[in-house]
Amino acid sequence: MNETKIYLPGLNGLRAFAALSVVIAHLSLKGIADFGLPVVDDIPMAGFGVTLFFVISGFLITYLLLKELNKQSNIDIKKFYARRILRIWPIYYLFIIICLCVLILLGKQHEILSNEMWYYLFFTANIPFILQQGIFILLHYWSIGVEEQFYLFWPWIVLKSRNKLLKITVVIFLLLFVTKLLFWWYFGSSSYEYRFISVTRFHCMMVGAIGAILYFKNQIGFKNLFSNKTTQIVSWLLFILMGFNIIYIPAVIAHEVISVASLSMIMGQIILHNRIFNLENRLFDFIGKISYSIYIIHPLIIFLLSGFFKELNIEKNLKFVLVYSSVIVVTIFIAWLSYTFFEKPFLKLKVKFAVVESSNSMLS
């Protein structure tokens, strides 16, 4: 184990922001649950929250791999995968079991006992999501599948590329982004070809990886530009206003715009002297540490509470406040229970496989 821990301030706060963005958006979207409240067809905030997660993941994973490579001129791939398994798999599979039990009790086991379950068991949930199918209570698992698939190839590329990593990462980003544009142009936005790259956003993770490489190399121009207060203000405004459809950016480039904005949000936190928002506080750190659990369990909480609130006949504005506050509070509480009493033993074991230990590694 490394004698010192790497800590990048504010990242847990950004994870908290991303997780809450997803929960709030899913509460408002048509088709997630019925609370007896007005719903909308499309709030991009949920997808943008996931993109923020992707950029954070690409940044932190790459930065830690570069630190490991710098420390011992090698990357222990087996230990890397051991850490991923211990962090992601336990709560991932436990939630599937819990969902099965809940749906059996409700007489809806057919919803989860389907041929599509194989995709969820083997971290390929993005495939039915691309095909606009899937198990309703596990639809959000598509993003975890994307993350796991990213981990299959990325540490090998970092290891083999070494001094050429920045060029290779930029090339991967450009190839994927240009391919996405071509698929959109020739096949349309509803085509499976376009949806494949739009859903499986490896190029968004590449944005985080590029930022990590430049930050690791202490590239002053990059740090000054992306931590600039004006850049941060524009980035936060883009995330929020685009997320609630207040301003519109064409969907074909929206997640790329949000990826670049997310990188500025990251740099604005870890480079302390230019912060416009300080997410390094006890509340955001707490929520950030359990953000993976929040993301995993929130659809079940929404589903269960919707059955209660739908029949609750109270004034609409009061119901709105009760629904949103109840779902958020209950989700955070259950996520804390999961993190404290189920996930922590695995996290303690995970540390034994650390070559470069990170205090930000609750998700990484």
Image: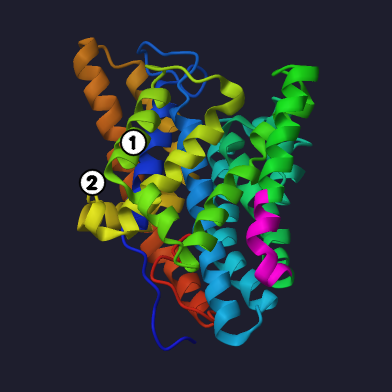
Residue 240 at x, y = what percent?
A: 35, 29
Residue type highlighted by circle 2:
Phe
Q: Which residue is mark 1?
A: 236
How crowded pointer 1 is (Cα within 10 Å; few <14, some 14-19, many 20+) is rated as some
**Viewer-proximal residue, 311 or 63?**
63
Magenta residues, start to end: 161-170
Q: Which residue is mark 2?
A: 277
Q: Is residue 232 in the magenta section?
A: no
Is 331 located above or below residue 139 in the figure? below
How crowded pointer 2 is (Cα within 10 Å; few <14, some 14-19, many 20+) is rated as some
- Report if residue 343 is visible in the image: yes
The residue lying furthest to the front in this view is 221
Q: Quadrant of residue 79?
A: bottom right
Residue 146 at x, y = what percent?
A: 65, 46
Residue type highlighted by circle 1:
Trp
Quick check: marks 2 and 1 in contact, CB under 8 Å? yes
